Amino acid sequence: MNSQTILLVEDNPDDEVLTVEALTFGGITNDIVVVHDGIECLEYLFGEGEYAGRDTSELPAVVLLDLNMPRLGGLELLTRLRADPRTQRLPVVILTTSKDESDMVASYDRGANSFVRKPVDFEAFTEAARNLGMYWLLLNQRPSR
């Protein structure tokens, strides 16, 4: 596709591997940066902690965000991202195993751009990952500021 980065926020090592493999098998060749909770995500995006000095003008093309994580969960992270002018328009896709309708509603209420349930079947997950990549990396148009 292109060189835009995907930021995956996922605390479960098995889901991390599955998601990265699904994206790769789905034909997504973009760089994938993985962080493991909401605090690490904020540090990456704002160039703090272990990411101090990172060029923060380089935002990812899309954030794939899990909901249930330690330290700072997905919904709280999403609230913080939408409250900061630097990240208020950053595309955020909730990528979760949750089947709870209230999680979907809360995600959209806090500014999620999309809510995707992770398919259990690897082939279906690969197809979903390919479709996510095609849309968010190629078709979606974002403002320059």
Image: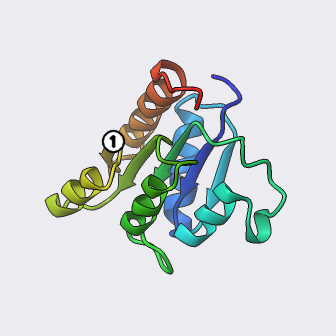
Picture quarter with the N terminus = top right
Q: Residue furthest left?
A: 101
Asked whether, in this view, residue 48 is left or right of residue 109, the answer is right
Compared with residue 126, is residue 45 higher up or lower down, i.e. above or below? below
Q: Can you see residue 125? A: yes
Q: Given the current orientation, which residue lies at the most extreme right position?
A: 53
* Residue 66 seen in the current view: no
Instruction: Name the amino acid type tagged 1.
Output: Ser
Horizontal side of residue 6 vs 100, given as left or right: right
Q: Nearer the viewer, residue 12 or 106?
A: 106
Q: Is residue 50 above or below residue 87?
A: below
Q: Quadrant of residue 76?
A: bottom left
Please count the marks in the image: 1
Image-quadrant location for residue 47: bottom right
Quarter of the figure that contains the C terminus: top right
Position of 76 with respect to 86 (left or right) is left
Q: Quick one: label 1, few (<14), some, or many (20+) residues within 10 Å?
A: some
Question: Where residue 109 sits in the image (x, y, percent)?
Answer: 24, 54
- Give the image location of residue 142, x and y in percent: 50, 26
Q: Kindly give the residue lying farthest to the top in the view shown.
A: 139
Residue 96 at x, y percent in the picture: 35, 57
Residue 75 sits above or below residue 65 on the image: below
Identify which residue is drawn at 71% across, 41% down.
Answer: 58
Which residue sits at x=80%, y=64%?
52
Q: Nearer the viewer, residue 65 or 23?
A: 65
Label 1 secondary element: strand
**Residue depicted at 46% across the width and 23% down the height:** 140
Rendered location of residue 31, percent (x, y): 70, 40
Identify residue for label 1.
114
Residue at 27% from the left image edge and 62% from the top image edge = 98
